[in-house]
Amino acid sequence: MTGRLSRAEIDQALRSGPRITPSRHDPWTGRRQPGARFTDSQLLKITDEGRNPRTIEAVDIPLMEEDRRVVVATATCPVLARSRNGRRMLIVAPAGDKMWINAR
């Protein structure tokens, strides 16, 4: 045994081997420049939507611990839309994901 795999053996291993998937995506993390109102991903999504980051409405979202008892931080998120009855808001999370959340 030479320790090297043939091209056919590599192809077979890739087809029948375990699948590697990305780790869970957290929409509540993002990189913010010093002094910036929004994260880089939020700014990109806002400008893609044709909105002005300086004048767009924003809301502070409390980020809770996993047991939902303690607020550990807040995230400032731009509001893209509101539902007709005003109970839900479409926001851009810090990672750039669009999400519907309950309005407070």
Image (cartoon, helix red, strand yellow):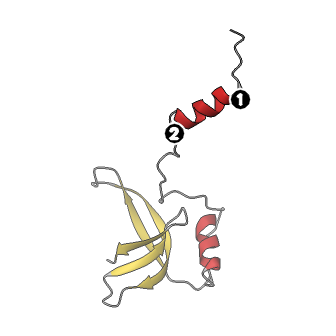
Look at mark 2 in the image and give the residue it sits on.
Answer: 19
How dense is the environment of label 2, judged by Cα within 10 Å: few (below 14), some, or many (20 and up)?
few
Q: Position of residue 48 (x, y in %)?
A: 64, 78
Outermost residue toward the top in this view: 1
Using the image, determine if residue 15 lies above or below residue 62.
above
Name the N-terminal-most of marks 1 and 2.
Answer: 1
The amino acid marked with disc number 1 is Arg
Using the image, determine if residue 4 lies above or below residue 58.
above
| Kind of element beneath mark 1 | helix
Marks 1, 2: nearer the viewer = 1
Q: Position of residue 34 (x, y in %)?
A: 66, 62
The amino acid marked with disc number 2 is Arg
Q: Position of residue 94 (x, y in %)?
A: 52, 64
| Kind of element beneath mark 2 | loop
Name the residue: 71% across, 29% down. Answer: 7
Are circles 1 and 2 on residues that touch, CB within 8 Å? Answer: no
Look at mark 1 in the image and give the residue it sits on.
Answer: 7
Quarter of the image for residue 89 reads bottom left
Q: Position of residue 61 (x, y in %)?
A: 41, 68
Quarter of the image for residue 74 reads bottom left
Quarter of the image for residue 45 reads bottom right
**Which quarter shows the N terminus?**
top right
Please state which of residues 74 and 11 is positioned toward the viewer in this rendering. Answer: 11
Please state which of residues 21 and 4 is positioned toward the viewer in this rendering. Answer: 4
Please state which of residues 7 and 65 is positioned toward the viewer in this rendering. Answer: 7
Q: Which mark is residue 67?
A: none
Name the residue: 37% across, 72% down. Answer: 101
